[in-house]
């Protein structure tokens, strides 16, 4: 069966990589549930199902769902767009691990959907375009550090598990790929306004070349913006500094 560009499909054909992904997921997932996004022809599914017989898989491609239903008769399979699915309808109120060889064209959106449902998802192991994987786990000060880095790291610790060349896939993508794990922090900070935090992160990185005193003019009085802290650019700010910045702005709201 041929991969479809419209679904961003690149089938993983490296059996060692498949085994490594599932081994890591099984070791990190402390729940008894799993949700696989984009199972395709089921190379991960086959191994995952051995440990998670009640797992759920979500596949948008009708041809793939037909194949999966034929070859995985008992699999709890939903045909649809994961981004449009209600997580609680799929998984109920039970925590679960999120896993998949994610379609690269929606991989960042999958992460943001995970963040929206973070209370139910203690771990994620996923395949990404390497550039995106690097962005998600990038430290402050790096060129790849940005919105998705800060918002993800507010709740999850990221780890690089595998780097893969295009030859590990059929058809080969034009980019390198990477598998990362995201493990939810046991005690993330909660004493700040999360909606405002998200807004501030996006606002500052929207003009990442500018000093934050220029991008935050509408949030703080001018005399505060003269402090040397506000001469920084967003890519140099740590998570803790973004949280403290959010608190400061909240304190000065009219």
Image (cartoon, rainbow, N blue to C red):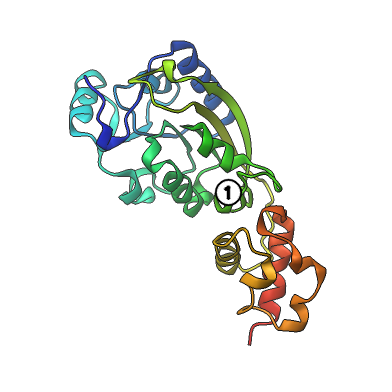
Q: Residue furthest bottom?
A: 254
Up/down of 71 relative to 35, above or below:
above
Q: Is residue 234 left or right of residue 130?
A: right
Q: Is residue 27 visible?
A: no
Which secondary structure, mark 1?
helix
Q: Nearer the viewer, residue 112 or 79?
A: 112
Query: Residue 61: horizontal and vertical position, in percent?
Result: 23, 34
Residue occupying the point 41% across, 27% down:
174
Quarter-of-image position of residue 169 = top left
Quarter-of-image position of residue 67 = top left
Residue occupying the point 38% across, 31% down:
55
Give the quarter of the figure containing the C terminus. Answer: bottom right
Q: Is residue 52 left or right of residue 134?
A: left
Residue occupying the point 43% across, 16% down:
168
Query: Residue 99: horizontal and vertical position, in percent?
Result: 45, 33
Q: Residues within 10 Å of mark 1 (few under 14, many from 20)?
A: many
Up/down of 178 relative to 17, above or below:
below
Look at mark 1 in the image and give the residue it sits on: 152
Query: Residue 17: horizontal and vertical position, in percent?
Result: 49, 16
Quarter-of-image position of residue 18 = top left
Q: How many marks?
A: 1
Q: Is residue 208 left or right of residue 242?
A: left
Q: Nearer the viewer, residue 21 or 123?
A: 21
């Amino acid at each position: 069966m041929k991969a479809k560009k419209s679904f961003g499909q690149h089938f993983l054909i490296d059996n060692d990589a498949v085994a490594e992904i599932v081994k890591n997921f099984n070791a990190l997932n402390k729940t008894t549930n799993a949700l696989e996004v984009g199972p395709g022809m089921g190379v991960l599914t086959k191994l995952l199902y051995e440990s998670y017989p009640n797992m759920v898989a979500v596949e948008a491609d009708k041809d793939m769902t037909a194949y999966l239903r034929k070859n995985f008769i008992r699999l709890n399979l939903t045909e649809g767009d994961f981004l449009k699915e209600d997580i609680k309808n799929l998984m109920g109120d039970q925590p679960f691990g999120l896993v998949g060889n994610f379609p690269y064209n929606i991989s960042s959106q999958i992460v943001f959907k995970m963040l929206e449902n973070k209370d139910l998802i203690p771990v994620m192991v996923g395949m990404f375009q390497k550039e995106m994987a690097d962005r998600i786990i990038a430290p402050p000060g790096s060129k790849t550090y940005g919105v998705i880095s800060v918002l993800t790291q507010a709740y999850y610790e990221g780890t690089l598990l595998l780097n893969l060349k295009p030859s590990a896939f059929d058809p080969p993508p034009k980019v390198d790929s990477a598998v990362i794990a995201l493990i939810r922090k046991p005690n993330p900070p909660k004493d700040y306004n999360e909606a405002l935090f998200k807004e501030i992160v996006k606002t500052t990185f929207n003009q990442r070349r500018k000093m934050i005193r220029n991008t935050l003019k509408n949030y703080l009085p001018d005399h505060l913006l003269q402090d040397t802290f506000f001469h920084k650019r967003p890519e140099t700010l740590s998570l803790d500094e973004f949280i403290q910045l959010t608190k400061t702005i909240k304190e000065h709201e009219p």
